[in-house]
Image: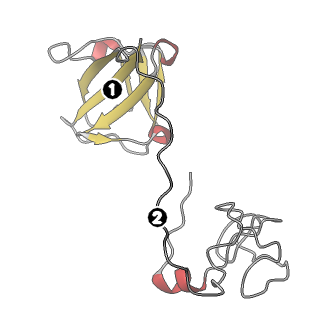
Amino acid sequence: MHFHIYSKSQIKEAPCMCFYCRRDKFHGKGKGRPCTHKRENNCCPCSRCYSCSNSRPPCCPVLGPQGPRSLPGPQGPPGPPISRPIQTTSLLYFTFSDGQNLVYTNSDGFGKYGITEILSPNEVSYINLFINGILQPQSNYQVENGKLTLLVDKAPSEGVPITLQFIIIN
């Protein structure tokens, strides 16, 4: 996934993302070509912002001052009671980086602190990967039954702890 970081000056002049062609001045379809739809006040004529789907794009000026806040409405009816707490199980697979490998298997597990089995994603509800205690984005790894593959260019430094957390909602 690609994210664009805008400078302060770009944020001030950044147009909304066009609802029709899903382009803007800085990124999107067309490799950065700006949207060619006619704009009023730097906004799409459709008065809808694709990126937030609000009725008025955030780049459009507000036409007047905001009115005073009123009192909150009455509280709604209570929801149904929770019959019992949701039972969950959290299992941890630990290993340590050797500084070279990007693939880890069950045999690499360090059983002193947790399980030595890499569970299949089909057996669990959630999987989180922590490298040196830092939660990693899912785009950085792939988990299969018995195998963890790091989808990065360089292996973590030697001795860095790698922890897979498996959460099972019963």
Tell which of 18 and 102 is nearer to you.
18
Q: Is residue 58 left or right of residue 88?
A: right
Q: Is residue 65 left or right of residue 88?
A: right
| Residue marked by disc 1 | 164
Q: Is residue 54 above or below residue 131?
A: below
Q: Is residue 169 above or below residue 5?
A: above
Tell which of 151 and 49 is nearer to you.
49
**Is residue 97 at all visible to an observer of this figure?**
no
Residue furthest toward the left? 112
**Is residue 86 at all visible to an observer of this figure?**
yes
Tell which of 50 and 66 is nearer to you.
66
Q: Residue at x 33, y 26 (%)?
A: 164
Q: Position of residue 169 (x, y in %)?
A: 41, 17
Q: Is residue 80 above or below residue 14?
A: above
- Residue 39 picture quarter: bottom right
Quadrant containing the C terminus in the rendered view: top left
- Residue 59 picture quarter: bottom right
Disc with the residue nearer the chain's start (2 vs 1): 2
Count of marks, rendered view: 2
| Residue marked by disc 2 | 71
